[in-house]
Image: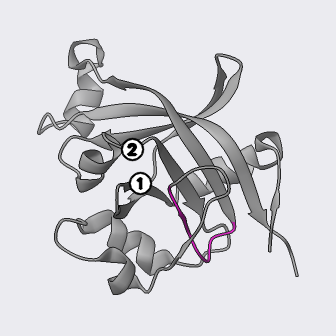
Amino acid sequence: MYKNVSIEEVAGKLLEQLKKGAFLTVKSGDMVNTMTIAWGTVGYIWQKYVFMAMVRHSRYTFELIENAGSFTVSFPLKGQLKEALSFCGTKSGRDVDKFKECGLSLLHAEKVDTPVIDGCDLYLECKIIYKSPMHPEQLPEEVKRMYYGNEDYHILYFGEIVAVRMKEEA
């Protein structure tokens, strides 16, 4: 069972896990894909709590999120699903069925069309409210050299956090 919680209650746990990996899931039409993310931002803008997710143009998820109205972020806080996080961070949904290969199943979200990954402890449901491409000319040269040597820059997707759910302790 899951309970609704406030983002303030879980922001620290969320940010700590983000460094280890989380699942960004997107649904467009009948297509669903998940990918591992380790970058993102939680914030408060426009009188809304938001999660900002970054997706590169080259990713299969980019094809889906461009036509989606929402995304979810699923956080396995207790060390579970490490192999799935690794797999989903190195394989493309264009080439493999990540859900089948990793034995992942989906749960319906409460407030958005995009599902969440079953077996995680914390979920964010986000309605996309803004997107923006990165502007390479505004990045420090060191950042471009370290992370964008191939010039595959991210698009920033700002999702209003419309639900935060956490697994209840047994």
| 138 vs 143, nearest the viewer | 138
Residue 8: x %, y % from top left: 80, 40
Q: Residues within 10 Å of mark 2 (few under 14, many from 20)?
A: some
Instruction: Quadrant for the N terminus, please.
Output: bottom right
- CB-based contact (under 8 Å), mark 1 and mark 2: yes
Q: Which residue is mark 1?
A: 26
Range drawn in magenta: 114-121
Q: Which residue is mark 2?
A: 68
Viewed as shown, does residue 125 lie left or right of 147? right
In the picture shown, does residue 93 fall above or below 11?
below
Q: Magenta region's main secondary structure?
A: loop
Identify which amino acid the numbered label 2 is placed on. Ala
Quick one: SS at disc 1?
A: strand
Looking at the image, tell me whether mark 1 or mark 2 is earlier in sequence order: 1
**Of the numbered discs in the image, which one, if any, rests on residue 130?**
none
Identify which amino acid the numbered label 1 is placed on. Val
Instruction: Quadrant for the C terminus, please.
Output: bottom right
